[in-house]
């Protein structure tokens, strides 16, 4: 990849003694790409975003944009000098300004009204230019907020849970629109979300966050197929974990042996099994019992119990004539199984 | 996420230190009470107080309780029913009445008392017309009644907003569980609004305890009467301070109640998603009845008193020159309003930083709310004479001359007393105005290229100017109406409209008292219209610009 437009190294931020928000986060943003920052609540996502914008000071670490150090050596560059556009979770539209004045806020020059209107028209909101924020629907407010952030042509656009206030249907529509606008502007964007599906849908690059650190980065496919840890795997979807020791280049699990060629014998590892890895074969004297069987429409979601009493989730395309209580055998698809160092 | 940080507001304050101004506000508000308490607890026990405790103190306490009780009952009934009608029903004129019902706050209770006593006294028009059947409005119940007529807006405002912000779901849940409409109201809407109503009642009781003009005109010997007598009659600072302390303790108790109820009010109503209730449409005679019911307090509290006083002023043309007094009143009120608004805004900014000193200062300044004007005046006198005693010998040693007498500091001393009582009234509105400027708005402005100063000018100022103006105007109205502190502290030959009205009314020269009374009310009404419309636009639409 080319040189990153933004580099964050060892970012630390602590609000009070008990809850450090950032504990040494590292991240790089590539020019023109959309990166999704995915993590559970309280993992430090919003703090990292605010630190990039310059709204939150860092206790340690540095943020470098191109050749310029924003945090690190000398005083921090103030937010107004960073050329960063930000879409806030509650949009933060100025309630005393109408839509066009909101968009024009970050613009200068005599033609700023014209440019603001053009930006609004690109968001198909030209007819609402004179409406005040409280007169706009939630989706319209989001579009004005994005138009406002993009209008000054920022180097980087930060979006903090930009779709969280919207209902499901509107969400996917606005998500597509937002991505299209960002791509059309050629923007480098960082989108914070706690929704794995959303992150996979919008991102060129995925950054997983947990406990104030970036725990894995990569393309969505790569991260999904090769999670670096159980925590990373759980962020992206259902996964069951077996912890065991490596012997003879493999791990014995209740689902059968899993190859672990890259690990030393005796090493403690986590075996991460996605529900899709388990194919269920009906058998009268099978080794596994179905303890739960539920249709989600397109799929059948099952839980099965192994001989040692452990429970595993499996899924298979519906329809399927399996029932709770049936006994089954399984086939393990190793593509959806990953072995990682155990967290302990 | 819960990490809406504090960097932006902190940066926005660069250049002026809000916390130090908040500390100044706290000192101004709290110093008089502290000094009063110190003198009361350490000074020699004079004969007057011993005598007082045996004879008058029980009377003062009983009458204070009586007056405050009647006022609470009257404002509670009026304010709650008006608040419900405006918030939850629809009838002709409702929107207009929504803010007009706040206006009687501009009428000083003593002005209402002058007019009503004159109307109902033996030989007065009401007495004559009803052959003496109409009771003469006087004594403690009469004073309580007058407070009910002009102070009910406190309860009305809080009750109205509480009813309006309630979710309909709770009421509907009660209906589906088998409650009839009235039962559902009594068991859901009313209990949910109760903390707000109680907070309003506490304000009313504090105001009626602080009053001097009404109770002295109607002959209700309350604590503040005793206090003014101890100072201007017996001339004893220690005794005045002791009575002040009793009054402050009672007021602080009610004040604590008010704060606790307000916290509860927030917890009861502020539950995020609420479905606004549908208004009951009152058609036909019901609508007319509602309209008449709303007009009643306006007539009794505002139009009838003003009408009677206007009649008196016209039938016995006044010979008093009111120009100087009017200028004095305006100067005091405007100065106090501007300083109070500035202190309120600084305190609100300081609070935003969430620093410990700022928070404690704001709380201390808030105590001023509970300080009756007479107590603030006694405190200011004590501070001035204490300073004098310290400075006199030093000055004499240095210059050989006599130190100028501080007690004649005059207008400045008056402003000090007004601020210690009313600055607190500006902090709350300033805080709520500034709460509209969320940290995210700061962040948005900064990331769009605005410097901290530009953010303050382009985002903060437009959003807070309405609330701040209304806070300043409220202080203006209060200072214009203020009587006891002015009487105690005013320099010799320095009159305000309120003092002139009171002196003539005390001499039973109501024709002369009428004109200054009308002037006070009319001058107070103009800013009150702005305040009332501001408060109503914010609660009705939730938005303004």
Image: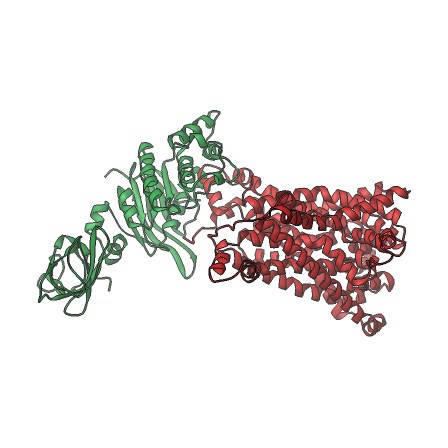
Chain colours: A green, B red
Residue B334 position in % (x across, y down) = 73, 44
Residue located 68% across and 60% down the image: B370
**From the viewer's perspective, is residue A309 above or below residue A198?**
below
Can residue A237 be seen by looking at this rendering?
Answer: yes
Residue A325 position in % (x across, y down) = 17, 66
Q: Quadrant of residue B252?
A: bottom right
Residue B305 position in % (x across, y down) = 79, 49
Q: Nearer the viewer, residue A261 or B444?
A: B444
Residue A42 position in % (x across, y down) = 37, 55
**From the viewer's perspective, is residue A22 above or below residue A291?**
above
Q: Is residue A300 left or right of residue B394?
A: left
Residue positioned most to the front: B284
Q: Is residue B460 left or right of residue A241?
A: right
Q: Quadrant of residue A286?
A: bottom left
Can residue B394 be seen by looking at this rendering?
Answer: no
Q: Quadrant of residue B529?
A: top right
How many numbered circles are shown? 0
Q: Nearer the viewer, residue B128 or A36?
A: B128
- Looking at the figure, which quarter contains the C terminus of chain B? top right
């Amino acid at each position: 990849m080319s040189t990153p437009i933004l580099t964050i190294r060892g970012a630390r931020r602590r609000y009070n003694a008990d809850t450090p928000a950032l504990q040494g986060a590292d991240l790089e943003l590539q020019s023109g790409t959309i990166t999704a920052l995915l993590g559970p609540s309280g993992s430090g996502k919003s703090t990292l975003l605010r630190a990039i914008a310059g709204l939150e000071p860092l206790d340690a670490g540095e943020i470098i944009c191109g050749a310029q150090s924003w945090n690190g050596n000398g005083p921090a560059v103030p937010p107004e000098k960073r050329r960063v556009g930000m879409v806030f979770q509650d949009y933060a539209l100025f309630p005393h300004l109408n839509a066009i004045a909101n968009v024009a806020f970050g613009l200068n020059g005599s033609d700023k009204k014209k440019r603001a209107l053009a930006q609004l028209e690109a968001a198909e909101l030209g007819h609402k230019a004179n409406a005040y924020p409280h007169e706009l629907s939630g989706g319209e407010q989001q579009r004005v907020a994005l138009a406002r952030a993009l209008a000054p042509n920022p180097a980087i656009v930060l979006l903090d849970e930009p779709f969280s206030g919207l209902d499901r249907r509107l969400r996917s529509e606005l998500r597509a629109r937002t991505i299209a606008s960002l791509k059309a502007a050629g923007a480098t964007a960082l989108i914070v979300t706690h929704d794995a599906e959303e992150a996979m849908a919008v991102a060129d690059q995925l950054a997983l966050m947990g406990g104030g650190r970036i725990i894995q980065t990569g393309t969505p496919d790569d991260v999904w197929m090769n999670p670096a840890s159980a925590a990373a795997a759980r962020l992206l979807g259902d996964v069951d974990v077996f912890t065991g020791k490596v012997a003879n280049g493999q791990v014995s699990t209740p689902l059968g042996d899993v190859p672990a060629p890259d690990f030393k014998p005796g090493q403690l590892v986590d075996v991460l099994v996605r529900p899709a890895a388990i194919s269920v074969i009906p058998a009268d004297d099978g080794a596994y019992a179905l303890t739960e069987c539920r249709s989600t429409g397109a799929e059948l979601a099952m839980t099965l119990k192994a001989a040692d009493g452990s429970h595993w989730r499996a899924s298979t395309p519906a329809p399927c004539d399996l029932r709770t209580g049936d006994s089954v055998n399984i086939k393990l698809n190793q593509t959806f199984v990953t072995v990682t160092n155990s967290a302990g | 996420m819960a990490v809406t940080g504090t960097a932006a507001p902190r940066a926005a304050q660069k250049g002026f230190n809000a916390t130090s101004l908040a500390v100044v506000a706290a000192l101004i508000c709290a110093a008089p009470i502290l000094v009063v308490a110190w003198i009361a607890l350490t000074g020699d026990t004079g004969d007057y107080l011993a005598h007082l405790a045996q004879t008058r103190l029980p009377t003062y306490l009983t009458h204070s309780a009586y007056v405050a009780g009647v006022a609470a009952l009257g404002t509670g009934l009026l304010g709650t029913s008006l608040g419900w009608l405006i918030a939850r029903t629809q009838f002709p004129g409702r929107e207009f009445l929504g803010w007009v019902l706040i206006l009687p706050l501009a009428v000083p209770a003593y002005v209402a008392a002058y007019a009503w006593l004159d109307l109902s006294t033996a030989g007065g028009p009401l007495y004559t017309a009803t052959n003496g059947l109409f009771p003469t409005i006087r004594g403690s119940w009469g004073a309580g009644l007058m407070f009910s007529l002009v102070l009910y807006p406190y309860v009305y405002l809080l009750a109205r907003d509480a009813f309006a912000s309630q979710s309909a779901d709770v009421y509907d849940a009660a209906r589906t569980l088998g409650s009839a409409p009235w039962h559902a109201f009594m068991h859901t809407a009313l209990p949910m609004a109760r903390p707000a109503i109680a907070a309003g009642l506490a304000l009313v009781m504090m105001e009626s305890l602080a009053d001097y003009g009404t109770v002295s005109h109607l002959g209700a010997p309350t604590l503040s009467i005793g206090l003014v007598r101890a100072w201007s009659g017996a001339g004893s600072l220690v005794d005045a301070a002791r009575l002040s302390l009793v009054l402050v303790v009672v007021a602080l108790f009610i004040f604590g109640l008010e704060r606790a109820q307000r916290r509860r009010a927030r917890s009861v109503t502020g539950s995020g998603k609420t479905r606004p209730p549908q208004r009951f449409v009152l058609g036909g005679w019901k609508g007319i009845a509602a309209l008449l019911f709303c007009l009643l307090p306006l007539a009794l509290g505002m139009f009838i008193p003003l009408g009677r006083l206007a009649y008196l002023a016209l039938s016995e043309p006044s010979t008093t020159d009111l120009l100087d007094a009017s200028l004095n009143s305006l100067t005091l009120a405007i100065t106090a309003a501007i300083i109070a608004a500035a202190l309120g805004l600084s305190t609100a900014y300081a609070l935003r930083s969430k620093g410990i000193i700022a928070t404690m200062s704001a709380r201390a300044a808030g105590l001023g709310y509970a300080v009756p004007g007479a107590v603030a005046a006694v405190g200011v006198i004590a501070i001035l004479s204490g300073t004098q005693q310290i400075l006199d010998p030093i000055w004499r040693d240095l210059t050989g001359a006599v130190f100028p007498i501080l007690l004649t500091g005059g207008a400045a001393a008056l402003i000090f007393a007004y601020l210690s009582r009313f600055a607190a009234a500006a902090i709350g509105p300033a805080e709520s105005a500034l709460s509209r400027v969320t940290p995210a708005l700061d962040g948005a402005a900064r990331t769009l290229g605005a410097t901290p100063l530009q953010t303050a000018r382009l985002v903060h100022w437009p959003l807070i100017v309405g609330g701040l103006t209304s806070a300043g105007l409220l202080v203006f109205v209060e200072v214009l109406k203020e009587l006891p502190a002015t009487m105690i502290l005013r320099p010799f030959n320095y009159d305000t409209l309120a003092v002139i009205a009171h002196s003539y009314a005390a001499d039973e020269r109501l024709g002369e008292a009428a004109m200054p009374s009308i002037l006070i009310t009319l001058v107070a009404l103009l800013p009150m219209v702005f305040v009332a419309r501001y408060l109503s636009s914010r609660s009705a639409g939730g938005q303004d610009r």
